[in-house]
Image: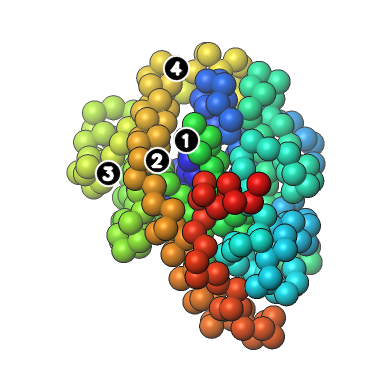
Amino acid sequence: MKIAFVGKGGSGKTTLSSLFVRHLGAAGLPVLAVDADINQHLGVALGLTDAKAAAIPPLGAHLGLIKNYLRGDNPRIGSADEMVKTTPPGRGSRLLRLDEDNPVYDACRRPVGSCCSGMRIMATGPFQEGDLGVACYHSKVGAVELMLNHLVDDAGEYVVVDMTAGSDAFASGLFTRFDMTFLVAEPTRKGVSVYRQYRDYARDWDISLAVVGNKVQGPDDLEFLREHVGADLLTWTGQSEFVREVEKGRTPGFELLEADNRAALERMREAADATYERRDWARYTAQMVEFHVKNAHSWANSKTGVDLTTQVDPDFVLGPAALAGQV
């Protein structure tokens, strides 16, 4: 299952995504957390020290390795330099499984904590000095999009991506790569404004969107969310002493998380799991191809000097069957 957390800046998006990752890890489930926010805080929220979080190898620094590995011997891709963030896999490409060892994971994936062996993290990396004024953040998350385009995940496996704040994710095709998008919303006018943007953008792309209310302090807050979000409100969380301890740099056991908040996380897991039955690999692949063709015509052909639309393998559908053919 591929799951995104989005929301207004300061809504608690990173906190909720870290709690959800811990909830999955505590159940013994394999989970890969991906920090794709401009402000890289997910590692610390998961209990890593500042030094260990900063030491997570940035995906952007290993983009050459990622491209060369995923390219495999796909005859439609002349070189790694001809791969862009939207490049779709085809026959000959190397596909990824969540729970495996490969050179990309060896270089960029790191374990999180000692309590849950199935929890791992990857990070896009923060802006570097050389990026300032000359690069947009989408150059960082491109590695995430490329990897998700080549990932064949299964039920009971989870990729949880902490996205950048606001509706910025719609500037690329990354928003279509998820089975479930959780939008974290505070019970405020600003909190629900991002929801409206996501709802309107997602409508035409068959995106599964659920709202998680955060910082809900009483019936009035809950009624406000129901009024502005309606049936998209899945669940909500309230104040948490556990979270306050974590934010102070302490490491309380996850079993100390309040029962109401744990119940909300389980409801989110149930909702995410339910989307697996609706997974359509052919539609997923078609969306991938559509965004690749758009990007090719918009900027990628001129940048690479190659017609990247020829990378599309018309007979290829990402999914278990393609993975079986790779073995």
Name the residue carrying label 1: 155
Question: Residue drawn at (59%, 63%), measured in percent from left and top?
Answer: 90
Mark 3 and mark 4: Cα distance apart in space:
24 Å
Mark 2 and mark 3: Cα distance apart in space:
18 Å
Task: Report the amino acid beneath label 2.
Answer: Tyr
Number of marks drawn: 4
Decide: is 67 above or below 298: above
The kind of secondary structure element at disc 4 is: loop
Marks 2, 3: nearer the viewer: 2
The kind of secondary structure element at disc 2 is: helix
Q: How crowded is mark 3: few (under 14 residues within 10 Å), some or many (20 or more)?
A: some
Q: Residue 146 carries which label?
A: none
Residue 36 spot, x, y in % from top left: 60, 50
295 to the left or right of 196: right
Q: Are marks 2 and 4 in contact (CB under 8 Å)?
A: no
The kind of secondary structure element at disc 1 is: loop
Name the residue carrying label 4: 258
Name the residue carrying label 3: 232
Q: Do the residues labelled 2 and 1 touch (CB within 8 Å)?
A: yes
Mark 3 and mark 1: Cα distance apart in space:
23 Å
Name the residue carrying label 2: 276
Pick whichever of labels 4 and 1 is earlier in the sequence.
Answer: 1
Pick whichever of labels 2 and 4 is earlier in the sequence.
Answer: 4
